[in-house]
Amino acid sequence: MSKSLQAIRGMNDILPEQTPLWRYFEGTVARLLDNYGYKQIRMPIVEFTELFKRSIGEVTDIVEKEMYTFEDRNGDSLTLRPEGTAACVRAVLEHGLTGAGQPQKLWYIGPMFRHERPQKGRYRQFHQIGLEVFNIDGPDIDAELIVLTWRLWGLLGIRDAVKLELNSLGTSESRGRYKVALVEYLSAHLDKLDEDSQRRLKTNPLRVLDTKNADTQAVLVDAPKMADYLDDESRIHFEGLKARLDAAGIPFVINTKLVRGLDYYSKTVFEWVTDKLGAQGTVCAGGRYDGLVEQMGGKPTTGVGFAMGIERLILLLETLEKVPEEISRQVDVYLCAFGEAAELAALALSEKVRDQLPNLRLQVNAGAGSFKSQFKKADKSGALYALILGDDELAQQVIGFKPLRGQGEQQNIAFDALAAHLATCVVQG
Ligand code: ATP
Ligand code: MG
């Protein structure tokens, strides 16, 4: 196929054989979030470029080099969203959802776009589920966000494979004082810093802590620590969070180098990481952003949230072989009919059965075919049972009922009794 007719590098089709796992994952998360009282919000995929510059920060990797930005026909600069928080804050402000200090617990799901180097676990179109909470200041809500992800890992069977890393970036005042100390220290070791870190020292010094460069990491060993610069407010918040995680029995490690890639974080930052996926080990990450809403033109409104990468979590489920077997079976019953008269009767009968068993996954053969070919399709569909309707059965107003997975004998069931019979042998979700 010519290249222009292929999908864009780093942007993947999710094929029919993969969608059951996606739906299982998304369904599990959606139910969990319902249970914790989060409400879904859906934002557009495209926003004004300015929104991301203002919120994410001009000197972040995302804004500097990862955004899909283009001019539309009006000459407006638009960007495919690289993350969800900015648009969520925009929507909340635009619709007054946090007016008069009203709390909001929101979540969203959808594709995000970043022009990165595609590799396992890193794509140019990828999917996130994100949560954002507004106007709840205390560490209790930071803890809830972490507790519910811990519960999710439990539901998915991956708790053993993920680790929680935690840090506090303090209030903007304490972070400001820390920045001064860090810049002073690093400036004294300028010649030992890699080029990127030298640049970041000027533009976004906290990001130096994030370096992968071994020489720079060596310099950082003796660098001032944020923990020593936290003011009382930040410290009390952080202690409150840790106490709650202890109370909930959630293990964590403090990572003083955890700063996150976006500019807007304050106080709590955290990441759930795994060592099972190679370099792309962060499956969920977030933190508190108490200054962001005001920075975007709203009234002072605290915020805290996180986003998880769906592709990475799907990869993790596959790697750990935690894909539940039953999700790939999408057909309970496959109906085969032979000849025009039987097909007509089969259609009427199957619709009657659907009326009575709305959750039954009943596939009716389409495209006619010999006994052999229909039976092959029935088997391949994964169905537990085949129903067989030919002229003989039709004459007697019965249908052949044949277990396909070795559960019992074939028998004939009267049309009228079919729904009741299926109800006894198919577990309905
Ligand atoms: P990383 O350090 O891996 O680049 P990030 O800090 O840029 O991640 P966030 O902006 O915090 O990531 O996004 C939250 C989550 O979304 C990440 O932890 C990850 O699971 C997922 N994610 C981010 N970028 C990508 C991508 N390009 N492809 C797939 N998943 C991604
Ligand atoms: Mg990134």
Image: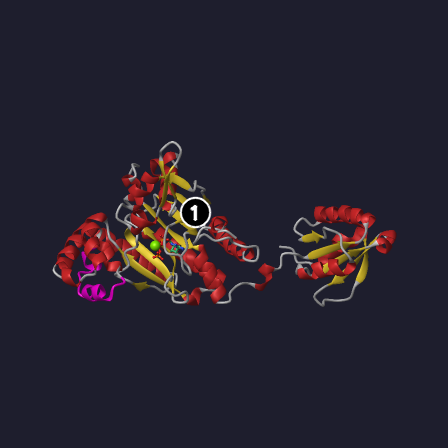
* Image quadrant in which you'd find residue 380: bottom right
Residue 109 pos. (x, y %) = 45, 48
Q: Report the magenta residues as a range.
A: 212-230
Across and down, in percent, residue 207 comes to 25, 55
Residue 119 percent across, percent down from the top left: 40, 60
Amino acid on which disc 1 is placed:
Trp
- Residue 154 x, y percent position in the rendering: 46, 62
- Which image quarter has ligand 2? bottom left
* Residue occupying image coordinates x 45% and y 44%: 39
| Residue with the mark numbered 1 | 107
How many labels were placed on the picture?
1
| Quadrant assignment for the C terminus | bottom right
Taking the image as shown, residue 428 lies to the left or right of residue 284, namely right
Q: Is residue 423 visible?
A: no
Compared to 81, does 329 lie above or below? below
Q: Nearer the viewer, residue 36 or 163?
A: 163
Kind of element beneath mark 1: strand
- In the image, taking residue 193 as reference, residue 66 lies left or right, namely right
